[in-house]
Image: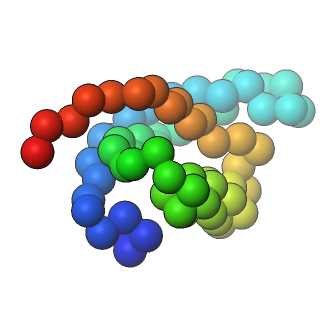
Amino acid sequence: MPRFRDGLTLVEATGQWRCRAGPTVRERSWVPVLYHQAEEGAEQAVASVVDAYKKAFEQEAVLRDRDMTCVTL
């Protein structure tokens, strides 16, 4: 969270994933919703969080969905 001082939202979720070994794994998870400017610093911050999460929780993959959105302040 320190990388995104403007804030973000965390949504609790339940999901499933078929791992490389074959079985389907079901697990609780959190979905962060983050809005940021399309700039290199923000992209690098998101990528570093993805990498850290994969290492910390021994994940094969992390879903990342990117869309253009209009935000009114």
- The x and y percentages for residue 37 are 39, 48
Residue drawn at the location 70% of the way across and 49% of the way down: 59
Residue drawn at the location 78% of the way across and 32% of the way down: 19
Residue drawn at the location 57% of the way across and 56% of the way down: 40
* Left or right: 25 as drawn, with respect to 1: right
Report the number of numbered marks: 0
Q: Is residue 31 above or below residue 8?
A: above
Residue drawn at the location 26% of the way across and 62% of the way down: 6
Specify how the rendered protein is coloured: rainbow
- The x and y percentages for residue 39 are 50, 52
The answer, for residue 30, to whether it is visible in the render is: no
The answer, for residue 37, to whether it is visible in the render is: yes
Along the line of sight, which residue is nearer the eye, 14 or 31?
31
Residue extending farthest to the front is 39
- The x and y percentages for residue 48 are 62, 63
Residue extending farthest to the bottom is 2
Residue extending farthest to the right is 21
User: Residue 44 occupies which quadrant of the picture?
Assistant: bottom right
Q: Is residue 4 above or below residue 11?
A: below
* Left or right: 46 as drawn, with respect to 37: right
Q: Is residue 72 above or below residue 69?
A: below
* Left or right: 18 as drawn, with respect to 31: right
Q: Is residue 20 above or below residue 48?
A: above
Along the line of sight, which residue is nearer the eye, 23 or 52?
52
In the rendered view of the protein, which quadrant contains the C terminus? Answer: top left
